[in-house]
Image (cartoon, rainbow, N blue to C red):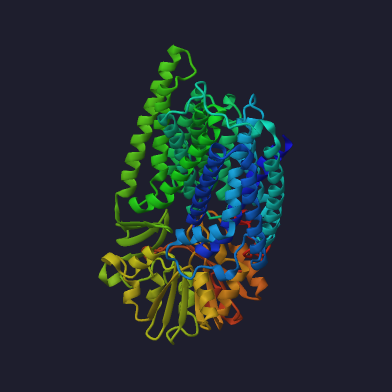
Amino acid sequence: MLIYLLSIFLSAFLLFQIQPMIARFLLPWFGGTPAVWSTVLLFFQVLLTGGYGYAYGLMGRVRADRQGRLHLILLGGSLVSLMILGLIWPSPITPSADWKPTNVDWPVARIFALLAMAVGLPYFTLATNSPLMQAWFSRARPGQSPYWLYALSNIGSLLALVTYPFLIEPWLTLREQGWVWSAGYTLFVILTSLGAWRSRRDRAVIAPVPRPTDSTPRPAASLQILWVSLSAIASTLLLAVTSQMTQEVAAIPFLWVLPLAVYLLSFVLTFSGERWYHRPAFSLWLAGASLGLGWIILNPLAALLWQLALYTLFLWVACMVAHGELYRLRPAPAHLTRFYLMTSIGGALGGLWVNLIAPYIFSGYWELYIGWALITLALAGLTFIRPTELRLRWRFGHDVAVGALAVVITLFAGFTLLALSGGDLARGRNFYGVVRVRLDSAHNTYAMIHGVTLHGAQFIAPDQRAQPIGYHWPGSAVGLALRHHPRYGQGMRVGILGLGVGVLAAYGQPGDHYRFYEINPLVVEWAEGRDGYFSFLTDSPADIRVALGDARLVLEQELAAGQPQNFDVLALDAFSSDSIPVHLLTREAFEVYLAHLAPEGVIAAHISNRHVDLRPVLRQVAETFNLQAAALYIPASETTLATSDSLWVLLTRDPTFLSQPAIAAPAQSLDDVPSLRLWTDDYSNLFQVLK
């Protein structure tokens, strides 16, 4: 008994500890985009389905006395693979630097390949454990329900998610995390091997596999479709809410694990017994949570805490409904492995839908609205399939109200999608997000928008097309840095991380060299003149080059090839979006930037942001590398159209640069900014800089 409990708990803990850990490791390799987490989740959902399929086949098609023997082979093979990788990599699950991708083509396939090599076999083995142990437990103790073990499994998963951002990530480097996890996996193999060996000797297990009898008929196909559908809806909402939360805040483990923890909590509660899910109560909860979600959708610039709270509440309620109804439809223990296989297939289908299908058929993030409508429609449909636990006179009113809720939410979601799609001149979606081009009639400009963040604009009038505007107008800090650099107009070399519409190319002079680094091919296409909206790059007299790929990886590759760029100004313009690419702010990142910087060069970091204050991070960078630093907050001009408030930090080795009157006047020292621990590739803490 104890072996079953420990093995199930530990395997679940390791299953969900590895997810944020390996995603955190791969994030810088693919541009720090939130889609990395969705892709990692999809990989693990697919592998989880494979593990459940293995357990289903092993229990249903292999003689009981051979099941343990075959499983011991799988356990041993996974442990051997882990030991081999530990000899050639920094840790058994963290690939060495030479595995970094060299381009941005097919990111989903590349992430899948890396994950398969690093953790594929161990994760698959862990995925088999919960249904397998529950099945062996059920056969060894026919009179006891095994479903409470599923709740125990989810408690282990939930504990793993809660501890990672608060206990593991802040205190251990990624390499140390890899070794600690591998030690835990070794312990799991020992425990599970004992369980598999016992299964060969337990008479109850060695007895012939019980066939379903008349009392436990095979579940109907319609019932199995319901299992898959409910699980797929919950999975869709998990990924959709996670995307909403991370694309405008930051792709960090906390905002990954919060939705996933809520998702698992719903499993823990609903599979612990029917007392936790009461349909009438959660019908009211769903209506209230839907009101909150609708408010957030209509107020996308609401405070961060309100966004997190209302998105999280909605996800929890929706998952409680999906998983509560799923538990009510559970089969007899004889069909346990089939039930888990169908639910895992549903989870994988939800992941495939969000990651591989939706980006190619939708031009926006529409999955949340579709999932929202589906969960209300599913609840309405299930009120007619399985009667609500109310007296008849109350049941009718409840069921009508649930049906009305489904109709209202479906109509609201549909009209919202139409409203969001309207007004766009152009729209595109890929792995890196949704990019839109809109007409700003108030300023007579074309604007490029990613999520709710403006990524640059250009006047439509021909005589104004060359005028830099927005965060980059001549009075902004970056405008001052470019125009007051000693080499301005004398063949400057300028690097820009983040292309947007290419506004900074407007400062280019004949003989200058401007090199933009951009990871999103859609952004490059429109900035280079697709459909005729933007022309900064083509109109500039400077020599303009665009390097496609994650800026840091491309800069590292240039150094490795012996091609330092010797930039006079290096503009880090990748932080104005509320989703912060943390890997561009670490010590290792600035080592790369400084290697590309001319001796008198200037780094200009754009840190205008609604949710975080990055000045403490840059203060620590300046102290670490002995740089002169100043923050320049420049309000929008009252006389120049289409300008924006902006906050930049200038860093340089040359103390005389910051003393120029035009720069010194608006400059503010960073000495009064709180000091914090230097961010590295192994350590960062966004909580320290939340506003």
Eyeballing the image, is 55 above or below 284? below
Quarter placement of the N terminus: top right
Residue at 40% over, 36% down: 374
Residue at 32% over, 62% down: 446
Foreground pick, 282 / 689: 282
Where is residue 525? Give x, y as percent.
34, 67
Where is residue 190? Give x, y as percent.
72, 48
Residue at 47% over, 50% down: 243
In the displayed structure, does residue 492 sit left or right of residue 677? left
Q: How many marks?
A: 0
Foreground pick, 92 / 201: 201
Where is residue 209? Give x, y as percent.
58, 32
Where is residue 545? Give x, y as percent.
40, 77
* Residue 133, picture quadrant: top right
Foreground pick, 533 / 261: 261
Q: Is residue 667 visible?
A: no
* Residue 375, picture quadrant: top left
Residue at 61% over, 41% down: 67
In the displayed structure, does residue 26 sit left or right of residue 107? right
Foreground pick, 530 / 127: 127
Q: Is residue 159 visible?
A: yes
Eyeballing the image, is 450 above or below 668? above
